Image (tube, helix red, strand yellow):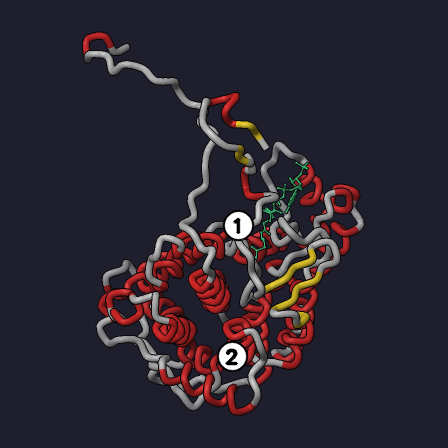
Amino acid sequence: VIDIRKLYGATGKFTYDPGFMSTAACNSSITYIDGDKGELLYRGYPIEQLAVNCDFLETCYLLLNGELPNQAQKDEFVATVTKHTMVHEQMQFFFRGFRRDAHPMAVLVGTVGALSSFYHDSLDISDKHHRDVSAIRLIAKLPTLVAMAYKYSIGQPFVYPRNDLSYSANFMRMMFSNPCEDYKVNDVLVRALDRILILHADHEQNASTSTVRLAGSSGANPFACIAAGIACLWGPAHGGANEAALQMLEDIQKQGGVERIGEFIAKVKDKNSGVKLMGFGHRVYKNYDPRAKLMRETCYEVLNELGLHDDPLFKLAMALEKIALEDEYFVSRKLYPNVDFYSGIVQRALGIPVSLFTGIFAMARTVGWIAQWNEMISDPEQKIGRPRQLFVGSPTREVPPMSKRG
Ligand code: ACO
């Protein structure tokens, strides 16, 4: 805590906390993380139990409403989400305005933001009913938009949603069907995608969620807020890490695989190299990220189902993990695998292109963002977010005439 009056003549005491390492910006009852124990709870339920016993839409219901649904509540929720999976036909013109080689995250920031121009009722955020409908619209339409971004990038026609399929099966079909061949649903792969979505659904006040809350604190509409969250998620230190982790594994593999791990680790430990072990380390977890364990199991199940037991990247990742976890550098800094270490391998096996990994993350995290946004709007203590600064620039001075400027 700095007494700012002594420094700048301003009033009051401020905390100077770059990166918000120890500043709580809100009360929340949605997600709890114990980083030292490696524990993650959604509304009190351990992620390990949710990942095994629930599907993604049940998890969405839980995050939004605070309790798991009973069968009737689940049926109604699934039917409501399913009813909203279509996007306005006009949306396709937004896609057609992008270059085909645009990064899907650039396309998502634009198209999710553009939803605000279609649903004017959602702009009235003072009405709880409108807020709830916005949440449903976002959860329902994100898979459609992500699949459209993919189809556009590869020059194939858009595939419309099919409402007799589950959330994840419908997404896989919109991704992988084409006019010549309909996608055949594989339950193991669909379940794996569902698990990826559950594991990424919320993670308390991470950078993108804080962005959504900050944007929302001004009263901005939910589509604009989620577009802001997507923009933040795109960064390589956040949602882009799964893409970077897979790239790293592929590079090591190209250079000789397991044999070259020692050399790679030495480079990571050399602070001048600028190389990080991607998919390792976390601001909050100072123990094994529980999601990484579940993702490693999922990886195993998917590769088995596809007959890829000997996948060289999976073997390389496991060897790299083992060596890093025995190395003093990682042990002393409490650096463990995070969720992104194995998620890239699973997604690649599902047929999802690397450039879409962060888009899948955005699709999963939308429910967390909107639940946190709704919690903030409903909080009577909610204020516009307005961080302060320690000003370190020039004191007051006179504007010199042009002839006197150096
Ligand atoms: N590889 C090598 N060294 C690392 C790594 C890593 N992945 N992560 C942290 N360190 C080192 C830092 O260099 C620092 O070392 P020092 O004490 O000698 O200076 C020490 O460990 C502490 O790291 P910080 O940067 O202070 O940790 P911070 O909490 O700020 O960063 C972060 C967390 C950004 C996730 C970091 O660990 C990282 O960049 N990891 C790789 C990227 C990644 O996997 N991101 C995904 C995060 S999970 C998610 O978004 C879903």
Residue 213 position in % (x across, y down): 45, 56
Considering the numbered disc 2 on the image, is that residue within a helix, a strand or a loop? helix
Relative placement, left or right, of 192 versus 233 is right
Q: Indicate whether 146 appears above or below 329.
A: below
Q: Indicate whether 333 appears above or below 183.
A: above
Residue 66 position in % (x across, y down): 56, 73
Q: CA distance from mark 1 to mark 2?
A: 28 Å
Relative placement, left or right, of 314 versus 115 is right
Residue 406 position in % (x across, y down): 28, 10
- Mark closer to the observer (1, 2): 1
Label number found at residue 224 = none
Residue 374 position in % (x across, y down): 44, 65
The answer to which quarter of the image holds residue 231 is bottom left
Instruction: Residue at 40% x, 87% y: name it.
Output: 163
The answer to which quarter of the image holds residue 291 is bottom right
Which of marks 2 and 1 precedes in the sequence?
1
Q: Indicate whether 335 appears above or below 225.
A: above
Relative placement, left or right, of 202 versus 160 is right
Position of the N terminus, as image quadrant, is top right
Q: Are marks 1 and 2 in contact (CB under 8 Å)?
A: no
Mark 2: C-beta under 8 Å from nearest atom of ligand 1? no
Considering the numbered disc 1 on the image, is that residue within a helix, a strand or a loop? loop
Comparing 158 with 28, the one in front is: 28
Looking at numbered disc 1 in the image, what kind of residue is underneath it?
A: Ala
Q: Which residue is mark 2?
A: 57
Q: Which residue is mark 1?
A: 25
Looking at numbered disc 2 in the image, what kind of residue is underneath it?
A: Leu
Residue 147 visible in this rendered orientation of the protein = no
Comparing 9 with 249, the one in front is: 9
Q: How many marks?
A: 2
